[in-house]
Image: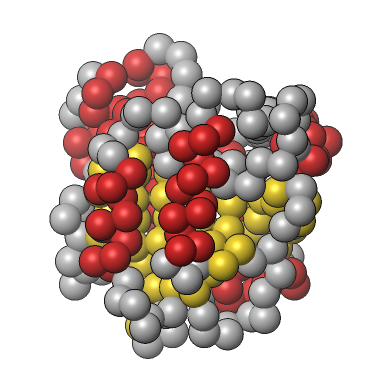
Amino acid sequence: MKFLGIDLGWRSQPTGVCCLNWVENRLQILDIDRKQTIADILFWIDRCVQTDESAIIAVDAPTIIPNLTGSRLPDKLTHKYFGKYQAGCYPANLNLPFAERTVQFGLALEARGFQHAPTIEPQKPGRFQIEVFPHPAIVHLFGLERILKYKKGRLEERRLELIKLQNYITQTLPFLEPSLYLGQNQKSSSPFPFDILLLSSTGAVLKEVEDKLDSLICAYVAAYWWYWGKERNLVLGDRTTGYIVIPQRN
């Protein structure tokens, strides 16, 4: 079973991508990278997951948008449940510039056999896709009182917040269930951890690391959803309204 995280660029920005593999009852990083175009992302997915292989693809983007205006139900619910953590998401509707790109991406995944899975039977093989949102996932997985503010602000402040995120990943995810293995036998095209964070504060470098770390969180949430289902996950919305899967810890 494989778990792919897609931190989708909603317009023309690069997209972070991560592939985890379930081997010997733990997760291993197979690849973590960035892609520029939708065609590049789909080619990468096809390379990571064979046509007869089971996988869940977790996308940080609204791939189901039923409403012409306003906000979707799951968008509103993120503010209701996670506003106090500053983790509400942007509204999505079909009149916004990114809508066609994100919805079409979800349809392209469906054409490859990845069906939406707002409900799931834990640890069942299959080809699924879900929508996820890293900010509340990070808050829940790492027991935080607010989001890590690595997306906006001064470069040095963003760098320090990204280092915090990297440290939470390396110090927490290997000890959760399912566990993320961060040993030396991974075959990632861009190794983890990103030691460059300790050396550089350029905007371009920080954005690259941000995209990759977000994609890793997305991939881990896919694995967490597959492993636990609704026992340890919150689902905001449904297949009709759009939905977001958010992990919860006991």
Colour convention: secondary structure
75 relative to 90, above or below: below
What is the count of numbered marks? 0
Residue lying farthest to the top in this orientation: 154
178 relative to 189, above or below: below
Residue 9 in view here: yes
Q: Please give left or right for residue 39 compared with residue 90 in the image.
A: left
Q: Nearer the viewer, residue 229 or 201?
A: 229
Residue 134 figure quarter: top right
Residue at 56%, 67% in the rendered image:
115
> At which x and y percent is residue 34?
26, 43
Residue at 19%, 72% in the rendered image:
185
98 relative to 66, above or below: above
User: Which quarter of the rendered picture does the C terminus lie within?
Assistant: bottom right
Q: Nearer the viewer, residue 150 or 72?
A: 72
> At which x and y percent is residue 188?
20, 60
56 relative to 15, above or below: below
Residue at 51%, 29% in the rendered image:
98
Q: Please give left or right for residue 167 compared with residue 235 in the image.
A: left
Residue at 25%, 57% in the rendered image:
43
Residue 3 in view here: no
> At which x and y percent is residue 28?
33, 71
User: Which quarter of the rendered picture does the N terminus lie within?
Assistant: bottom left
> At which x and y percent is residue 57?
47, 61
Q: Please give left or right for residue 122 compared with residue 196 in the image.
A: right
Q: Please give left or right for residue 191 compared with residue 156 in the image.
A: left
